[in-house]
Amino acid sequence: MFSRAPNRDLPTAVSAEGAWITDADGTRYLDGAGGAIVVNVGHGVRSVIDAIGEQLERTQYVHPTQFTTDAVEAYAEEVSAILPLEDARIYPVSGGSEAVETALKMARAYHLAQGRAGRSIVIGRRNSYHGNTLGALEASGKAPLRKPYTPWLGRFLHTPAAYEYRCENPKHPEGCAEWHASELERMISSYDPETVAAFVGEPIVGATLGAAVPSEDYWAAIGEVCRRHDIVLIADEVMTGFGRTGSWFGVEHWDLRPDILVAGKGATSGYVPFGFAAASGRIHDAIVEGGGFVHGFTWSHHALGAAAGLAVLRELKAGLVDRSRELGERIRSELGEALADVSTVGDVRGLGTMLGIELVRDRETKEPFARGDRVTERIVEAARERGLLVYSSTGHVDGHDGDLVMLGPPFCLTDEDAGSLIERTTDAVRCVS
Ligand code: PLP
């Protein structure tokens, strides 16, 4: 095994139900972050497990250039009706990074179809995360993840992050949306708009900035710049999608309609590896009529992902998106109160059940802890000792220092377990302060 955690002895997970995972020793863990903010509907949901089994009884593998399947067609029909895109067309793949790669190529194919071969630059944002394959990593702005591969990167550009707690706008909080839009405009004009293909961003920044919610009119301002220059706007909803932020998709909080939307994680809630890039009808038609899409994966358009996705969609439709919103509001407010007097807690933020806690050495100056203090790692460990799993990230302040802890429980979390999540999180954070 080439382990994801080579220096740690990992417990063996043997079963999971609702918001709980049990290991081989019988220890139970409250899955406070659904792994990596993945398990939206919860573990062990019978309808999803059955849908996967039933699909396997019908077909296993057929090549997507030779056949379609009822599962893929039914999923496309049902999911496109809720996507915040005009006449959405989905391209199913095996995960978030592949979905981002697909979206970037769709943007390029769209411009090629219009005879604009010069349009190749993608603009991402600093401190963003879009995946670990090379194209997705190139779009990402998280320095520690890019560093080992620097010789392979460098063609895309990055604008400032929409990060209210440490906003780069010198006049913050005044005119942040206009400032961000003018930074983007400045970058586009310095490279010539006829070279820019796409802008990609997470509606609410996920792991790299711990659920950073932008200012109210940020997305309207960015969307306007993109539209004016015919730059394809890609919303990376891999983490924010499928109810996580308390609405079906993150962009809905600001009525933004992107040209392409990327999904993963919560789309199948982790039951099978899956993701998709959805293009608006306008982008799809331009590509198909104007030259086609040179792209494809062996596992794209797989029936298993579609069957799991459809079953998850139906679970979510039965009230779970509202539950994510209510649950998130309660956790954020009670956690904020419980941590109000903890001097190391700089910020408690997020929307729906996508929540982040930023730890700082000094609340006034927002000075981060030195990396050597291992504050995040110690909180994660303290939480684990209390039977709670959280998600985390480090290095966002300057590529080295910076401590973030994230919560993102399954939406089926009971009120009692929500209380336990708040209590255990508070204890873990307090014991490291
Ligand atoms: N985009 C965002 C916003 C993500 O959070 C992630 C994963 O964390 C990805 C893309 C990459 O997805 P995957 O890990 O499924 O390749």
Image (cartoon, rainbow, N blue to C red):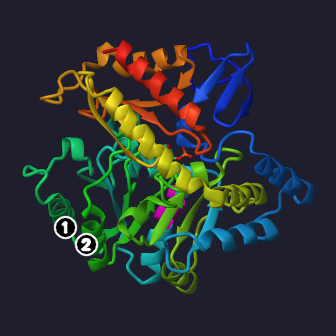
Residue 253 visible at all: yes
325 vs 345: above or below? below
User: Is residue 267 within the magenta segment?
Assistant: no
Identify the element where label 2 is drawn.
Answer: helix
Mark 1 lies within 8 Å of ligand 1 (Cβ measured): no
Q: Cα distance, mark 2 to mark 1?
A: 7 Å
Position of residue 197 measured from the top left corner of the image (x, y, whole percent): 36, 69
**What type is the residue that disc 1 sits on?**
Glu
Picture disc at residue 201? none
Would you call the spot at circle 2 few (<14 residues within 10 Å), some (14-19), or many (20 or more)? some
Callouts 2 and 1 close, C-beta under 8 Å: yes
- Which residues lie in the magenta part? 100-105
Q: Residue at x 85, y 57 (%)?
A: 55
Q: Identify residue for label 2.
A: 225
Number of marks: 2
**What type is the residue that disc 2 sits on?**
Val
Q: Quadrant of the N terminus?
A: top right
**Farthest residue, direction front:** 416
Q: Identify residue for label 1.
A: 185
Position of residue 316 measured from the top left corner of the image (x, y, whole percent): 63, 56
Q: Residue at x 71, y 61 (%)?
A: 310
Identify the element where label 1 is drawn.
Answer: helix
Q: Does label 2 or label 1 sit earlier along the sequence?
A: 1
Q: Chief secondary structure of the magenta span?
A: helix
Q: Quadrant of the C terminus?
A: top left
Would you call the spot at circle 1 few (<14 residues within 10 Å), some (14-19), or many (20 or more)? some
370 vs 273: above or below? above
**Farthest residue, direction bottom:** 289
Q: Residue at x 73, y 16 (%)?
A: 26
Position of residue 213 measured from the top left corner of the image (x, y, whole percent): 32, 50
